[in-house]
Image (cartoon, rainbow, N blue to C red):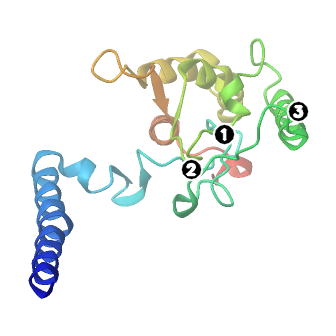
Amino acid sequence: MKNEILVALRMTVVTLALTGLAYPLLVTAVAGVAFPAQAAGSLVTHHGRVVGSELIGQAFTKPGYFQPRPSAAGSGFDAASSSGSNLGPTSLKLRDRVAADVARLRQENPEAPGLVPLELVTASGSGLDPHLSPEAALWQAPRVAASRGVPAAEAASLVRQHVEPRTLGFLGEPRVNVLRLNLELDRRFGAPAVRGASR
């Protein structure tokens, strides 16, 4: 019995060392060499300062910026509380929130074409989605352009220039990174007027 316990303890220690230390360290080292930016968190810098990550959405509520999907993560875009809302299609709370968001978006985007895109009123499963479909970004272009005093065609053109294709040509859908798009807006047209200067 004593021998069996010692063998089991040795196997436990060896397994923990291999799978709990050696393997994670090896994978981390390989990732750091092969994909340094991604391994460091895909950080985005602006004027030499880290302003976010390409992988984590942020709240942009001012009219001069493209807005992301709503977030149910913590108090909104909280990377430590990643989650969806868990509200189902029969939830009155979800219906009321969506109705309020649709009314708000319609009021804020009076010149937007067609219906409010569904993704602008529904949270992603993680609550941290940094992307929008090109259609959802283009729908907001008239508001962003009007707020910044630029032609709507220029804002729409900027969206089209920032469309990322499907990964490996077949995974996912074309998308626009909201943070990168908003930073490019500031780079190209300057920060918006005072009423929309902060995110």
Query: Amino acid under label 3?
Result: Ala
Instruction: Kindly identify which residue carries mark 2.
Output: 58
Q: Are marks 3 and 1 in contact (CB under 8 Å)?
A: no
Please give the name of the residue rendered at 53% of the width and 41% of the height, measured from the top-left corner.
129
- Residue projecting furthest to the bottom: 2
Instruction: Kindly identify which residue carries mark 3.
Output: 99
Relative placement, left or right, of 155 versus 31 is right
Report helix, strand or loop for mark 1. loop
The answer to whether any part of residue 123 appears in the image is: yes
Crowd around label 3: few <14 · some 14–19 · many ≥20 (10 Å) = few
Report helix, strand or loop for mark 3. helix
Instruction: Kindly identify which residue carries mark 1.
Output: 123
Q: Position of residue 73 (x, y in %)?
A: 63, 54
Instruction: Point out the tag, 3 or 1, that comes first from the N-terminus.
Output: 3
Query: Amino acid under label 2?
Result: Gln
Instruction: Point out the tag, 3 or 2, that comes first from the N-terminus.
Output: 2
Q: Nearer the viewer, mark 3 or mark 2?
A: 3
